[in-house]
Image (tube, rainbow, N blue to C red):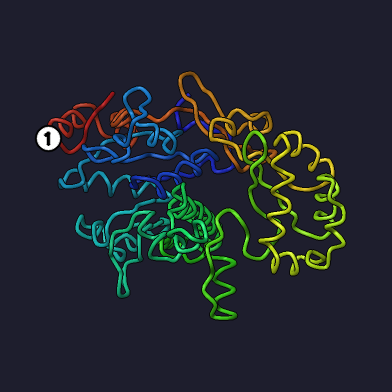
Amino acid sequence: MNAAESTGSLRGVRVLDLSRVLAGPLCAQMLADHGAEVIKIEAPSGDDTRGWGPPFAGGTAAYYTGINRNKDNICLNLATAQGQRVLGELMAGADVVVENFNAGTLAKWGYPDEVIAERFPALVHCRITGFGTDGPMGGTPGYDAILQAYGGLMSTNGEAEGPPLRVGVPLVDMVTGLHAFAGVLLALHERRDTGRGQVVDCALLDTAVSLLHPHSAAWLASGAAPQRSGSAHPSIAPYDSFAARDGLIFISGGNDRQFRALVEVLGMPELAGDPRFATNADRVRNVARLRELLAARIAESDRRELGESLRVRGVPATPVHEVGEALTDPQVLHREMVVERDDYRGIGIPIKLTRTPGEVRVAPRELGADTRRVLARLGYPDDEITALAESGAVRDGA
């Protein structure tokens, strides 16, 4: 089955994925997972992430294969006039284009915003940038960690006495991909009434700032800078990881009922009546002493047995899993969040629909694997495709 065949909710929608690295490819993969026909267009050098390894899967970095399934792949040299002409023909038949070029790149190739709007009025143009295209930092390139630092997110992460730390996953890139996915769906919905596309403008900076809650709300209300608190929560206690006898466990006592249940399970029911810990506000004020008391008892416990005892009593608690533990966990597997198709292994689809579910149909393709087939569908005869390949305008990887 090829990437165009689908019964998903976005079947019939054609997407050009001109993006590379993470936010754009993730957005396009989500559209593809839910049935859109996605054509990934790569330069002859390929997406940078094809080489971001080890590890590699079949010669391609796992970083790339994790965000580029369910896509046809064509190789197009947009530095050539022929490549730019082919791009225009592809856009003419597309509903959506996703790109994260440096500001002005499409204009340099003959496709500034006003030309796109005039020639392709129904096209939804999803633009992903680091800082936006205008303003004091407009056009500045940005990677995930740069925006974690610039946008204040890094300042909130780390231990209280330690330095700011990058969040351990590319959170800004990935959430920007989610925002782009939602923005494309909003624009497609609006197009049903007007017949017109529009620009979906997503910047990593905007995402980073949007992720600052609750610290942003607290600063706007009080002007107080947040203090790093490691894995603890600044306004809930207990809400932290603790060392059990055999590893770490995370426990949340988010309300008074949960706190009472927690201390009863730990054999410390008197703490629920202690005026220092009577309410959440009291517990936050006295969190250092509370943590000391809880930690001593938790250290005597097995993390899985304690976690199950707390779960039965309605207290959210879990062992702190390593990545491998999470990806082999029975509930994760039950939710189909790890998928295997032939030689492909990947993460499942987090948005579940009952009538038109998403589907993993095809593994990430080799560079240019579908160039000839896609161009033939545009009406290019075989000899002209061969001539384009010989000129360097396209690469036929079939």
The image quadrant that residue 381 belongs to is top left
Which residue is drawn at the image coordinates 48% and 44% (left, top)?
13
Q: Which quadrant: the C terminus?
A: top left
Kindly identify the amino acid type of the residue bearing the numbered disc 1: Ser
Describe residue 263's horizontal placement relative to residue 80 as left or right. right
Q: Position of residue 388 (x, y in %)?
A: 17, 34
| Outermost residue toward the left in this view | 391
Around disc 1, counting alpha carbons within 10 Å, would you say few (fewer than 14), some (14 to 19), or many (20 or more)? few
Describe residue 73's horizontal placement relative to residue 250 as left or right. left
Is residue 197 among what the camera can see?
A: no
Which residue is drawn at the image coordinates 35% and 58% (left, top)?
146
Q: Where is residue 130 in the image (x, y as percent from the top left)?
A: 35, 60
Is residue 175 among what the camera can see?
A: yes
Give 249 or 190, whichever is nearer the viewer. 249
Secondary structure category for the residue under label 1 = helix
Q: Quick check: 139 above or below 347?
A: below
Describe residue 168's horizontal placement relative to residue 83 as left or right. right
Q: Quick check: 341 above or below 39?
A: above
Which residue, given by chain and number where applicable, does mark 1 sit on?
Answer: 391
